[in-house]
Image (tube, rainbow, N blue to C red):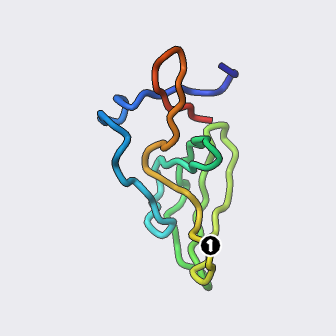
Amino acid sequence: MEQGIKILKPKDFNMEEDLSDVYLEVKNIKKGNVFFECNRMANHRLTALTNARRISDGFYVVAETKDGEKIEIFYSCFTSYPGPNFYIEPQYLTKVENELVYIIE
């Protein structure tokens, strides 16, 4: 494993199977929420530094990566794109040493 990568097991989320719908809309993010951006088979852990707020034609929130980098997230209400892939739990399982785990980058 690379340095800085964390491994979590499904049981860490009180789940027996990865079947729950845990999608998180940007407008529902609150300060202090820990959430995950999951895309391209990777789980990225984020912590909200602000509540999501409506500005002009969308929603804006500031978050921090697990490495301490601050990022600004804006989601337009008028896009045809479905939006960012944010979840309250990681989504991509990986097999490591014959065990299914979530790798958090």
Position of residue 51 relative to residue 13, above or below, is below
Residue closest to the eye, 87 or 59: 87
Residue closest to the eye, 55 or 3: 3
The residue that disc 1 covers is 81
Position of residue 10 measured from the top left corner of the image (x, y, whole percent): 39, 32
Residue at 62 percent across and 73 percent down: it is 81
Position of residue 10 relative to residue 41, above or below, is above
For the image shown, how many numbered marks are present on the structure? 1
Position of residue 44 relative to residue 11, above or below, is below
| Amino acid tagged 1 | Tyr
Q: Residues within 10 Å of mark 1 (few under 14, many from 20)?
A: few
52 left or right of 14?
Answer: right
Quarter the N terminus occupies: top right
Residue at 50 percent across and 34 percent down: it is 93
47 left or right of 68?
Answer: left
Position of residue 83 relative to residue 70, above or below, is below
Position of residue 73 measured from the top left corner of the image (x, y, whole percent): 64, 63
Residue closest to the eye, 15 or 99: 99
Position of residue 60 measured from the top left corner of the image (x, y, whole percent): 59, 70
Residue at 53 percent across and 60 percent down: it is 50
**For numbered disc 1, what is the local secondary structure?**
loop
Residue furthest to the top: 97
Quarter the C terminus occupies: top right
Position of residue 95 measured from the top left corner of the image (x, y, whole percent): 53, 25
Specify the quadrant of the image occupied by residue 30.
Answer: bottom left
